[in-house]
Amino acid sequence: MAFCHPEPQAKGLVIAGKCEILRRLRRLRMTKKEPYCHVHKLVTLRIAQSQLLFNAFRLSIKSFWIFKMNPNTTRSQDFLDLLERAKRGRLKLYLGFAAGVGKTVRMLKEAQALKQRGVDVILAYIEPHGRAETADLIGDLEVIPRKQFDYRGITVEEMDLDAVLARRPEIAIVDEVAHTNVPLCRNRRRYQDILEIIDAGINVICAFNIQHLDSLNDLIERVTGVVVRETIPDTFVKEADQVVTVDLSVDDLLERLKSGKIYTEDKIPWALEHFFKIANLSTLRELSLLEVAESLGRRPPSGPDEPEMAGKTSPRALGRVMVCMASASPRARTLLRKGSRMAGRLNTHWFVVYVETPGEAPTRIDAETQRHLLEHFQKARELGAEIVRLQAGDPVPALLDFARSHGVGHIVIGRSHQPWWRKFLGRSVTRRIIEEAAGFDVHVISFEEEE
C-alpha cells in the first residue's frame, strides 16, 4: 500500500486556519467592534494553535506508520518487551535421556570449538563425575572457581554466580541444571542462577536429563519407579532458543555403564537393577526425542513470512487450555502437569481456573486446605500457567463463561470424587461440564493408575 507523506496535508490545516482568521479579521474591520490590537493577538494565538495541531498530526501519522509496518505491535509494552529480549542472553539446552549419554562431553567440545574461533567462553560450572574422558576435555578452558559455603558443619561447593556476572563472558557453560543450591545461596535452584546470568546479557549453554522435567515427574515415577526430587519447570525449557538432544542407543549406553564409564564399579549392579533397565531407558529416550520435537513446534516462525505464519499458529487458532482446579483436589499436581504437557504440545497459552463458591470462602475452609491451594497455584505458575480466581455460587457456568470469553478450546478436569448419589443424579461438576460444554474438547483425567 502506497504511503502518502502527511506533511502537505498538515500544512493545509495551518493554511485553512489562517484563512479562517483572515475572514474573521475582515469581519472585525467591517464591523469595527474590536480594537486592532485585540485582533493581532487573536491572529497570533490561532497561528500558534495551528502549529501545535500540525505537530500533533505529524506525530500521530508517524505512530500510525510504525504500527502499520508491524501488525504484531499493538501496544507500547510490546516494543519494551522487544528491547528487553534484545538485552538478554541466549539459552541453548542439551537434553539427554540418562546419565552417561554424553551431554557434558558435547558441551565441552563445543566450548573448545568456540574458543578456537576467538569467542570468550568460560566454564561457570562443570561436573566431570570422576570420568577421565570428561576431565581431559576441559583442557585450557577458563574455569570459574567454585564458591565454598559452610553449612551445618559441612563445606559445600556451589557455582559462584557473582564471579560469573563480574567476569561477563560472551558464553558461560553450566552443568547440572536441576541442582538444588545450598540455602545460603541467593537462588534456591541452579536454573534460577542461569536465568539471572541470561538477564545480565550473557549467553548460556547448559544440559540436563529428561527425567528432571517437572511436567513429566508423575510419568517418570510410574514408569521407572524412581521418585525424582529435583525438577526443572517447563517454563525454563520454553525460554531456550535452541534445544539439542544428545542421543545414544540403549545398547551403547548399557555398554558404557558396564565398562565403568558412567559409574564406579560398586554402583553398576544397583543401576542395572533399578534405573538402567532396558524398558526404562527406551521410554526415557522416546520422551527426550518427543520433547525436542515439541520444542521445535514452540519456536516462533522466522523469515519474511513471519507475521503470516505467526497468525496461523496463534493460541486462539489452536485453542487454549483451561485446567479446572478444586480447593481439595488430592491429585492437583498431576492435573497441572497434564495441562502443561497438553499446552506444550499445542504450543498455546493455558489457564488454571479456580472458582470460589460461598462454601469455599477463606473464612470457611481450614488452613491446611488454603495452604495446599496456594502451593498448587505456585506449581501452576512454575509450569507456565496463568492463574485465574473466580467467585460464583455455581462453578460450572462460571468456568464455561470464562472458557468462551478467553478462546479456550480444551478443558482439563479430574475425575469426580463426589458421592455416588450426586453422580447418579447427574449433579457432579465433571458430568455437568461434559454435558454443557458444547464446542469444547473436554479431557477427563483419571488417576487410577497412580493409586
Image: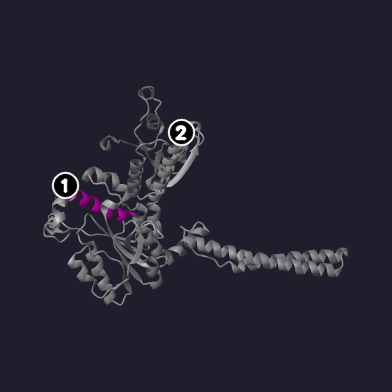
Amino acid on which the number 1 mark rests in the picture: Ala
Q: Is residue 287 magenta?
A: yes
Identify the residue shown where x is 55% and y is 65%. 62
- Toward the front, the furthest residue is 153
The quarter holding residue 17 reads bottom right
Badge 2 marks a residue whose secondary structure is helix
Label 1: which residue?
279
Give the percent coordinates (x, y) of residue 176: 29, 60
Start and end of the magenta stretch?
Answer: 276-298
The front one of 85 and 169 is 169
Left/right of residue 218 with respect to residue 20 in the rendered view: left
Residue under numbered circle 2 = 395
Which callout, 1 or 2, points to the residue nearer the camera?
1
Task: Calculate the distance from the C-alpha at mark 1 to the C-alpha at mark 2.
Answer: 43 Å
**Above or below: residue 267 compared with residue 139:** above
Q: Around disc 2, counting alpha carbons within 10 Å, would you say few (fewer than 14), some (14 to 19), or many (20 or more)?
A: some
| Quadrant position of residue 146 | bottom left
Q: What x and y, as percent, mark residue 90?
A: 36, 65
| Residue 438 image label | none
Image side of residue 145 versus residue 85, left or right? left
